[in-house]
Image (cartoon, rainbow, N blue to C red):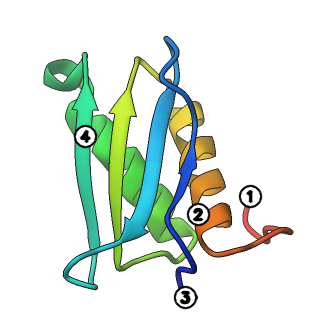
Amino acid sequence: MKLLNAATAGTLESGDILIVLDKAPSGKGIEINLKSTVANQFGKRIKQVITETLNKIGVEGVSVDATDKGALDCTIQARVKTAANRAFGITKPTWD
C-alpha cells in the first residue's frame, strides 16, 4: 500500500488519543512519538498497541505522532486503524 497523505483520528478529550499518521522520514519501519500524561506508567504498552495494530494491518514506513489522554487499548486500536484508512484512501476496510 502507498500512503497517499497524512491523516489523523481521535481527539484530545479525556479518555481518547489523537493519532497522526505520516510517511516515516527513514521510509522504513514504524516510528512512534508519544506524548502522554501517563507515559511513565503506560507508555510502553501504548507504543506496543500502536505497533501491533499497524503490523496486523500490514502498514510500515510510517511515522506516528500520538497524543494520549488516557485511552484504553480498544480506543487506541480504533484510532490507529481509522488514521490508516484515511492515510491510504481506504473507504471499505478489509481488516477488523
- Residue neighbourhood size for the residue with mark 3, other residues' Cα within 10 Å, grouped as few (<14), some (14–19), many (≥20): few
Assign a secondary structure to mark 4.
strand
- Say what amino acid the circle numbered 1 marks: Asp
From what the image shows, is residue 74 above or below residue 90? above
Residue at 26%, 54% in the rendered image: 32
Q: Position of residue 19 (x, y in %)?
A: 46, 45
Residue at 57%, 35% in the rendered image: 10
Residue that badge 4 annotates: 34
- Residue neighbourhood size for the residue with mark 1, other residues' Cα within 10 Å, grouped as few (<14), some (14–19), many (≥20): few
Q: Which is nearer the eye, 56 or 68? A: 68
Q: Nearer the viewer, mark 1 or mark 2?
A: 2
Q: Nearer the viewer, mark 4 or mark 1?
A: 4
Assign a secondary structure to mark 1.
loop
* Image quadrant assignment for residue 95: bottom right
- Say what amino acid the circle numbered 2 marks: Ala
Q: Position of residue 28 (x, y in %)?
A: 27, 83
- Say what amino acid the circle numbered 4 marks: Leu
Q: Are marks 1 and 3 in contact (CB under 8 Å)?
A: no
Q: Are marks 4 and 3 in contact (CB under 8 Å)?
A: no
Residue at 51%, 38% in the rendered image: 76
Residue that badge 1 annotates: 96
- The disc, 2 or 3, on the residue closer to the chain's N-terminal end is 3
- The disc, 1 or 2, on the residue closer to the chain's N-terminal end is 2
Residue that badge 2 annotates: 84
- The disc, 4 or 3, on the residue closer to the chain's N-terminal end is 3
Assign a secondary structure to mark 2.
helix
Find the distance from the CA under tag 1 to the CA under tag 3. 20 Å
Q: Are marks 4 and 1 in contact (CB under 8 Å)?
A: no
Q: Position of residue 82 (x, y in %)?
A: 65, 53
- In the picture, the quarter occupied by the C terminus is bottom right
